[in-house]
Image (cartoon, rainbow, N blue to C red):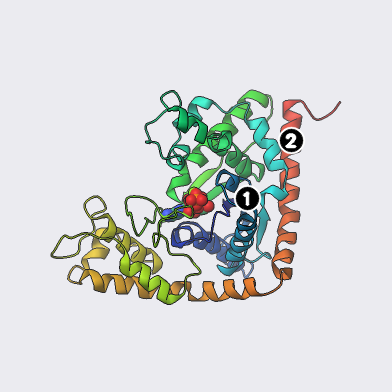
Amino acid sequence: GQAIFSLIQPTGTPHLGNYLGALRQWKSFQDEVTKSSRGTGKTFKLTFGIADLHSLTLRQDRQTRQDNVRKTFASLLAVGLDPTYSSLMVQSHIPQHSELMWILSNVASTGYLSRMTQWKSKINVSSDASMENLDEKSREMLKLSLFSYPVLQAADILIHNADFVPVGEDQVQHVEFARYLARAFNAEYAKDYEIPVLKEPRALISPAKRIMSLQDPTKKMSKSDQTKDATILITDPPEEIRRKIGRAKTDSIEGPLTYDPVARPGIANLFDILRHTINDDSNPEDFAKQYADQSKGALKQLVANVVVDELASVRERFESLMASSNDEMQRALLEGHKTANASARSTLSRVKEAVGMYNL
Ligand code: ATP
Ligand code: MG
């Protein structure tokens, strides 16, 4: 079967964007696998986990960091990921990720890295900034880890021989970069090999590719966004979800509700959340037409209802995991670790052999 791989950063509790854009999609691949064990559905090799090394690019104190790893792992189980079908792992527990990163650094161009957008958005410089025109303060803020983040991410993906990487839209350029690194590595070190050493992965973008902040609907919803009420956490109680959606920024345009992400980003985001939560795959303009005559308040109420319903069981499982001892989570991690570790070791040894560092 094909290998599917994806990670989430433990930079806070996952939010509705993470859920609709990533976690729920991971679970749906697992559903295919469970169906296939009953004779229908497709079979995949699934690996999902926690990018704790990546989350070092966000400053967090020790206790918060530790809590966030536990919360994020509990979230994976709470959305229904099951260690019987999905290998669940923590990035830093498998040192081969970091080792491959160093090797890939030798084919990763800094020119390509400097054109990527994530480091710019994380240090709040414009997306057309380049390394050369950064001021002194921004250069100080731009740590090496934030700049080379995509190289480690490529190592994560490539070390597990992923065919597909289910992610939100913001990560597509990183998966593209991983394809480029696989190609560059194979060309540099393994041109005499019949079978390429590293496999070129593809991004699988979820239909809910970019859920926006409730407070600034021109920015994506993000865990690391500290703006009050900007994100709906998958663990928020119903009254909290209703309150945040009730306060969501919209616009002062009167008349029928329309789907227009440029002129009416707040309303468009509410429509997107509604449509994706109920898994309606119709075209967004057509979808919105059914609600044209509703008031903004009524739309918000509708959105709140479906989100509350969707997240109820996730929250319940999350709370029960967090309240119980770590045993269940530790068991889940142990199984996944064994499988993920074996695949990482085998890829790294082929990589080292290709480079010429295998035997004395
Ligand atoms: P951070 O602010 O720390 O970067 P994040 O919310 O961006 O947190 P990540 O851990 O970086 O979350 O990403 C985990 C997955 O969730 C990725 O596949 C990413 O593409 C997806 N994702 C993140 N935010 C959104 C969003 N607003 N809409 C859809 N998908 C999202
Ligand atoms: Mg992110």
Quarter of image, res 277? bottom left
Q: As displayed, is residue 313 above or below residue 90? A: below
User: Which residue is located at x 74 percent, y 49 percent?
Assistant: 341
In the rendered structure, the answer to whether residue 337 lies left or right of residue 359 reads left
Q: Amino acid at mark 1?
A: Asp
Which residue is label 2 attached to? Answer: 350
On screen, residue 276 versus residue 50, left or right, reads left
When asked about the image quadrant of residue 192, the answer is top right
Vertical side of 14 occupied by 351: above or below? above
Residue at label 1? 52
Q: Residues within 10 Å of mark 2 (few under 14, many from 20)?
A: some
Q: Which mark is residue 116?
A: none
From this viewpoint, which residue is outermost toward the right?
360
Regarding residue 23, the answer to whether it shows in the image is: yes
Q: Nearer the viewer, residue 155 or 59?
A: 59
Q: Nearer the viewer, mark 2 or mark 1?
A: 1
137 or 13: nearer the viewer: 137
Q: Quadrant of the C terminus?
A: top right
Residue that appears at 25% across and 60% down: 250
On whether ligand 1 comes within 8 Å of the CB at mark 2, the answer is no
Q: Is residue 206 visible?
A: no
Locate residue 157, reporting x and y percent.
60, 44
Crowding near the residue tagged with mark 1, few <14, some 14–19, many ≥20 C-alpha atoms within 10 Å: many
In the image, residue 113 lies at what x, y percent?
50, 31
Q: Distance from label 2 to label 1 (Cα)?
A: 25 Å
Label 2 vs 1, first from the N-terminus: 1
Task: Report the amino acid beneath label 2.
Answer: Arg
Task: Report helix, strand or loop for mark 2.
Answer: helix
